[in-house]
């Protein structure tokens, strides 16, 4: 099958809810992906951090295969022999007490919302159906109807209402403005410690610690969505560790599935987790034996391969290399660990064209919000590949910029 016919088949029988680059991937290994013709790409995307451990990490593949020879799905109607150990390992990693495993990130966010509301009624004595959760402008927490209801991005919301009430929006990165919104019905504050989909927006230093103090002062819950920032992405196991701002509830996903399958979890203090009683919440697939085996091994690999440290060290190399790129199209470079957003000036270069040019040169990434190029490679990437990707990014900027200059001149 030709490249074009594979792409055509997908658009003929699939929904058009994504606009992928015209690259058809067939195999992968570590930080490399290969298309149907065997062309090699450096992965600067890591499937939005789901492939943080690299593609087909041998230890993760082996753990999954071992489990497949033993036991598949049994549902939560029974105990299974590795669920408790998985929950223990994840709770310990987060410095919290208990886990409720789900599958996708959005489901784990929904779990956090349910936990926060019930805690609001049962413990904070908020009047029935009045609980509020404070969220941040520019957030991305997934795609369910209740989650998109508190998104501020029109593209996520248009045509999908009516939306659930009970969410209050604060500006991101401004702890004082958020505190001013806390009222008698506030149950929780829910934010991303770095906003990924918004364009790798890093809040001012001290923001996370301020939120912790504010939530303590008002007796409300602090919940961090670390679906994308967690498990080493920012140079620590969790982003909140940069400011020692341990939340009451933590949402983990993406990389927890080792790039092999969807595994997510809501992790919390015991007093918060215990709002759930039998029948109040669940998931057919959440915490299944295969997910538990993969999730456990992912946590082990994170520690034993020192990937958070690696992300911190290589993240500095990446930032430095990107800051050395001298091009008028670059407006701002921001990030933490192996997670960087480069803001481009649309008057000089079009971010999508830059991504297309990078793909032709063998580097895969994707723009976010039309003007930001993200650099989020697997944490196992070699430094030489990282630097090569930055060089090829520079070449792409030059190509797209001069093409734009030509078409501009043609117009005159
Ligand atoms: C990706 C993401 C989600 C949603 O995860 P899914 O697995 O796509 O449902 C939630 N929160 C954040 C911060 C994310 O980046």
Image: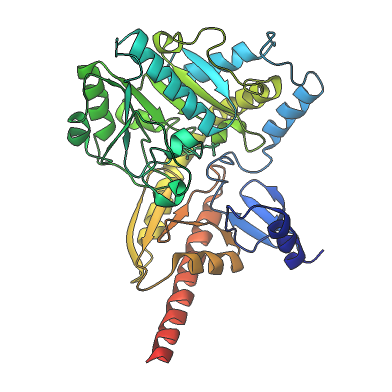
In the image: residue 122, left or right of residue 262: left
In the image: residue 355, left or right of residue 9: left
The relative height of residue 20 versus residue 280 in the rendered view (above or below) is below
How far across and down, in percent of the image, does residue 320 sit? Answer: 37, 55
- Dividing the image into 4 quarters, which one contains the N terminus? bottom right
In the image: residue 331, left or right of residue 322: left
In the image: residue 379, left or right of residue 78: left
Q: Nearer the viewer, residue 239 or 75?
A: 75
* Residue 337 location, quadrant: top left
Residue 111 in view in this figure: yes
* Residue 34 location, quadrant: bottom right
How far across and down, in percent of the image, does residue 180 sit? Answer: 17, 30
Q: Nearer the viewer, residue 144 or 271?
A: 144
How far across and down, in percent of the image, does residue 224 sit? Answer: 38, 29
- Dividing the image into 4 quarters, which one contains the C terminus? bottom left
From this viewpoint, which residue is outermost toward the front?
162
Q: Nearer the viewer, residue 226 or 144?
A: 144
Residue found 61% across the figure and 21% down from its top: 283
Q: Nearer the viewer, residue 111 or 305?
A: 111
How far across and down, in percent of the image, does residue 215 sit? Answer: 25, 22
* Residue 6 location, quadrant: bottom right
């Amino acid at each position: 099958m030709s490249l074009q016919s594979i792409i055509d088949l997908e658009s003929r029988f699939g929904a058009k809810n994504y606009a992928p680059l015209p690259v058809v991937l067939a195999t992968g290994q570590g930080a490399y992906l290969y298309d149907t013709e065997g062309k090699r790409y450096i992965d600067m995307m890591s499937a939005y951090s789901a492939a943080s451990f690299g593609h087909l990490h041998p230890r993760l593949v082996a753990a999954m295969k071992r489990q497949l020879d033993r036991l598949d799905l049994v549902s939560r109607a029974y105990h299974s022999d590795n669920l408790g150990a998985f929950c223990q390992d994840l709770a310990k990693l987060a410095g919290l007490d208990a886990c409720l495993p789900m599958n996708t990130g959005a489901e784990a966010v929904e779990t956090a919302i349910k936990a926060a509301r019930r805690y609001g009624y049962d413990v904070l004595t908020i009047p029935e159906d009045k609980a509020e959760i404070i969220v941040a402008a520019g957030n991305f927490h997934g795609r369910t109807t209740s989650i998109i209801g508190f998104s501020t991005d029109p593209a996520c919301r248009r045509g999908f209402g009516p939306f659930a009430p009970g969410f209050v929006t604060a500006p991101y990165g401004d702890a004082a403005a958020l505190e001013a919104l806390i009222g008698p019905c506030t149950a929780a504050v829910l934010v991303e410690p770095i906003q990924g989909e918004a364009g790798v927006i890093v809040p001012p230093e001290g923001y996370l610690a301020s939120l912790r103090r504010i939530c303590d002062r008002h007796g409300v819950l602090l919940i961090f969505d670390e679906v994308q920032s967690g498990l080493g992405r920012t140079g620590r196991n969790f982003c909140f560790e940069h400011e020692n701002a341990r939340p009451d509830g933590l949402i983990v996903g993406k990389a927890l599935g080792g790039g092999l399958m969807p595994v997510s979890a809501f992790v919390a203090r015991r007093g918060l987790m215990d709002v759930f009683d039998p029948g109040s919440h669940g998931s057919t697939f959440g915490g299944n034996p295969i997910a538990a085996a993969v999730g456990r091994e992912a946590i082990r690999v994170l520690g034993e391969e020192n990937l958070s440290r690696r992300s911190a060290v290589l993240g500095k190399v990446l930032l430095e290399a990107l800051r050395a790129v001298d091009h008028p199209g670059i407006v701002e470079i921001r990030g933490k660990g192996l997670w960087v957003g480069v803001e481009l000036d649309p008057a000089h270069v079009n971010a999508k064209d830059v991504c297309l040019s990078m793909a032709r040169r063998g580097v895969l990434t994707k723009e976010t919000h039309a003007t930001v190029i993200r650099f989020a490679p697997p944490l196992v990437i070699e430094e030489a590949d990282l630097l090569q990707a930055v060089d090829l990014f520079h070449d792409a900027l030059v190509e797209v910029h001069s093409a734009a200059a030509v078409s501009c001149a043609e117009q005159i």
